[in-house]
Amino acid sequence: MSLPDGTIDAFHRGRFFLVQPRGRGHRAGMDAMVLAAAVPSAFAGRLADFGAGAGAAGLAVAARCEGASLVLIERAPEMAAFARLSLALPQNAGIAERASVLEADVGLTGKARVAAGLEDSSFDYVIMNPPFNARHDRATPDELRRQAHVMDEDPFAAWIRSAAAVLRPRGGLALIARPSSLRAVLDAMDGRFGSAQILAIHPRPGATAIRIVVRAVRASRAALSISPPLVLHETGDAFSARADAINNGRASLFGD
Amino acid sequence: MSLPDGTIDAFHRGRFFLVQPRGRGHRAGMDAMVLAAAVPSAFAGRLADFGAGAGAAGLAVAARCEGASLVLIERAPEMAAFARLSLALPQNAGIAERASVLEADVGLTGKARVAAGLEDSSFDYVIMNPPFNARHDRATPDELRRQAHVMDEDPFAAWIRSAAAVLRPRGGLALIARPSSLRAVLDAMDGRFGSAQILAIHPRPGATAIRIVVRAVRASRAALSISPPLVLHETGDAFSARADAINNGRASLFGD
């Protein structure tokens, strides 16, 4: 396989691999692994990874949940190509037979969304790591990374609306975002999702959160709750035992 | 002093006392102490306690912050009377000289609010423990408790709007609520407050939060953040060291 601009990187201690652009674009890390860990271990069904990039979060779910079938949905042609290369790796054969790539913009609406391959009520779970709103961030060294991290409009309204459309009733949603996006996320979920669970990720015990993971259930009307947080480093630079287990696919984020 | 229906209860290990209705109505506890602990220890200025009841949260701030002057604002005449009795206790003399009671409904708007004694831009800090929305809770054994815990409308919109009116620019707001009210709180703050800080209170390390404390700054446009949580019980039934210090006025909730 010719990989002029790519690297092959191991995740979950070698249980799956990603082909990613070398030294540029968005490269998957802790965020994708934490997002994947939000899906219950017993999940079985059809899962969509919105804005999948090279496929990190979706493949991490499929590696942990053997009953999961996976559609990696990515708008950028170059990243969708990397996702296809990831599925073509012989090391991923056991997962790839349950996975496909769909090159589509999850921000589409109505008939355009259906025409792009995103049919209503066709998924049991959606995960998403929407582009961070980094318009004020001057450090955007290349165009691929810019596409992954920046949007001109708040992505949550459009992405969560699309997730509501493609999910069956009682289907699940999990997303990872910056804490500053919390209100936008809750507003976008209003009337579409219930049983929201917020989980904050703190780098250290005394530090403010750097990320939130939010789960919710389509067409539920149950109240919001706040789960115990995840602390990445208890002491020193090493991951806490829990963060390490989550990063390596050996534990779920919400304990289910 | 005649106290036919009241008890005198010590708080902050005897640094101040409350006169409260005996065995009925809302009796102050951990919620009021945690709310008071959200005010920075160095706070000096004019503080309003919205829906003060017998005065627990406001008096707890004044006991810890010697530069604070205090207005206890309570709508229910019987609870305002208990607040006046609290201020009249000889044990509270050092605090009472910096405190007063205003019998008023903080849900009023416009000229009616001003006429009730709540002038625009007249406070440096507002704290509030709004009535829980317990319409579905059948256990409302008496009318006084019902008034403290139940409102027909969501109280946050009205109370936070009033807080914005009476605060000076850059004035502070702190409130305690159930996690299920998070979205209503954030929506009510939108356009009025910034620099929101959310702090979840968990009964035990692995349990979902039972309360949130939210702080914010009037007329700020800075982003929301999530602070490290407070865990009430680390092991067994005793308070954690941090929770005990907060409950007794020897530590602040946000570490400032």
Image (cartoon, coloured by chain):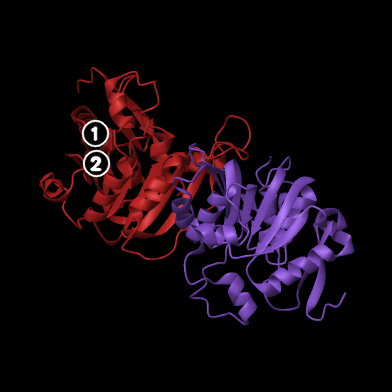
Chain colours: A purple, B red
Instruction: Name the residue type under label 2.
Output: Leu
Which residue position holds label 2? B72
Can you see residue A210? no
Residue drawn at (24%, 33%) of the image: B83
Give the percent coordinates (x, y) of residue A155.
Answer: 51, 63
Tell me if B162 is positioned left or right of A54 in this view: left
Label 2 element class: strand
Question: Are the residues flagged by discs 1 and 2 from a single subunit?
Answer: yes
Residue drawn at (59%, 43%) of the image: A168
Along the viewing direction, whichever of B204 and B140 lies nearer the viewer:
B140
Compared to residue B4, the image places residue B87 above or below, namely below
Give the percent coordinates (x, y) of residue A151.
Answer: 52, 71
Which residue position holds label 1? B83
Q: Chain of mark 1?
A: B
Compared to residue B127, the image places residue A110 above or below, namely below
Do residues under tags 1 and 2 come within 8 Å of each other at their CB atoms? yes
| Residue B35: image tag | none
